[in-house]
Amino acid sequence: MKTNTHIVIKREDILKYLTDNQIKYLDAVLNTITDGRKKDGKKTDNSYYICNTDEPYADEVLEVILKAERR
C-alpha cells in the first residue's frame, strides 16, 4: 500500500497559521517545484481528490483507489 506519497496543506490553515513572510517562502518553494517539473517535462497543474482518513467513508475510498491501481 502506498502511504505518505503526498503532502496536503489546507489553504485555510496556510492563511490562518502562517505569517505573510512564511507564505512567501512557501510560494517560492512551490514555484521551484513547479519549475523543476516543467524542466523534467512533467505536468505542472495536477489536481487531486482528497479524502481525510478520519472520515467514516475513508476505507471505502481507499479500496476504490487500490482496486483501480490493480488493473
Image: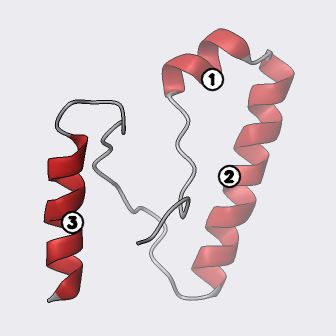
Foreground: disc 1 or disc 3: 3
Q: Is mark 1 on a helix, strand or loop?
A: helix
The answer to whether residue 61 is above or below residue 12 is: below
- Tell me which residue sits at (58%, 19%) in the image: 13
Q: Earlier in the sequence, mark 1 or mark 2?
A: 1
Looking at numbered disc 3 in the image, what kind of residue is underneath it? Ile
- Tell me which residue sits at (23%, 71%) in the image: 66
- Tell me which residue sits at (55%, 59%) in the image: 4
Horizontally, is 5 left or right of 47 in the view? right
Q: Which of 43 and 67 is in front in this view?
A: 67
- Tell me which residue sits at (86%, 23%) in the image: 21
Q: Are circles 1 and 3 on residues that touch, CB within 8 Å?
A: no
CA–CA distance between discs 1 and 3?
A: 28 Å
CA–CA distance between discs 1 and 2?
A: 13 Å
Q: Is mark 3 on a helix, strand or loop?
A: helix
The disc at residue 14 is: 1
Looking at numbered disc 1 in the image, what kind of residue is underneath it? Ile
Q: Earlier in the sequence, mark 3 or mark 2?
A: 2
The quadrant of the picture occupied by the C terminus is bottom left
Q: What residue is pinned by disc 2?
A: 30
Percent coordinates x, y for residue 7 in the rendering = 57, 50
Locate residue 56: give its quadrant: top left
Locate residue 45: give its quadrant: bottom left
Percent coordinates x, y for residue 28 in the rendering = 77, 47
The quadrant of the picture occupied by the N terminus is bottom left
Q: Which of 7 and 38 is in front in this view?
A: 7
Q: What residue is pinned by disc 3?
A: 65
In the image, farthest residue toward the top: 16
CA–CA distance between discs 3 and 2?
A: 26 Å
